[in-house]
Image: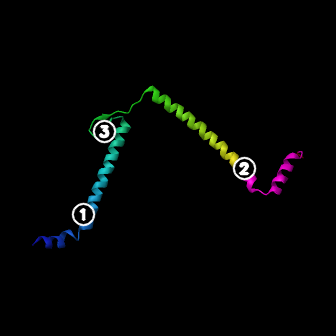
């Protein structure tokens, strides 16, 4: 048997399986790397840089305080955006309603309650 016969008889018919197997092995390697990194982070082990040197996450008082301040500012901005949305809904309602209906509602508010 020569090389052409082997390629025609064995390799070419099984080429999709060969390529699929290679892709599967590559995907499993990437998934394994992600899983081991997740385990290291979860249990507090240091991560490694590209040279194999341990990289410890820095945690000092300044960073903790900065995170607290940013979290507070984020909460304030979210509350402000919420109130702005409410006001925008009212403005959109005023703009899109007909003036006759708006006038009627204002007059109903001005009239004394029965």
Boundaries of the magenta span: 90-112
Query: Residue at position x 32%, y 50% from top?
Result: 30
Mark 2 or 1: in front is 2
The quarter of the displayed image where residue 71 is located: top right
Q: Position of residue 2 (x, y in %)?
A: 10, 72
Choose between 19 and 50: the one closer to the eye: 50
* Residue 7 located left or right of residue 69: left
Toward which corner of the image does residue 60 lie, by quadrant?
Answer: top left
Which residue does the numbered mark 1 point to in the structure image? 18
Report the residue that reaches farthest toward the top: 61
For residue 60, above or below residue 15: above
Mark 1 or 3: the one toward you: 3
Q: Badge 3: how crowded within 10 Å, few (<14), some, or many (20+)?
A: few
State the residue position of label 2: 91
Q: Which of pointers 2 and 1 lies earlier in the amino acid sequence?
A: 1
Left or right: 14 in relation to 84: left
Q: In the image, is residue 103 above or below residue 57?
A: below
**Residue at the image position 46 percent from the left and 27 percent from the top:** 62
């Amino acid at each position: 048997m020569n090389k052409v016969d082997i390629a025609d008889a064995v390799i070419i018919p099984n080429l999709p399986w060969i390529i699929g197997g290679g892709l599967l092995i590559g995907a499993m390697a990437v998934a394994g790397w992600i899983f081991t990194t997740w385990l290291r982070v979860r249990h507090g082990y240091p991560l490694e840089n590209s040279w194999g040197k341990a990289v410890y996450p820095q945690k000092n008082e300044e960073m903790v305080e900065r995170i607290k301040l940013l979290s507070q500012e984020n909460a304030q901005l979210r509350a402000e955006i919420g109130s702005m949305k409410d006001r925008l809904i009212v403005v959109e309602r005023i703009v899109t309603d007909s003036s006759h209906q708006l006038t009627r509602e204002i007059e109903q508010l001005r009239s004394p309650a029965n």
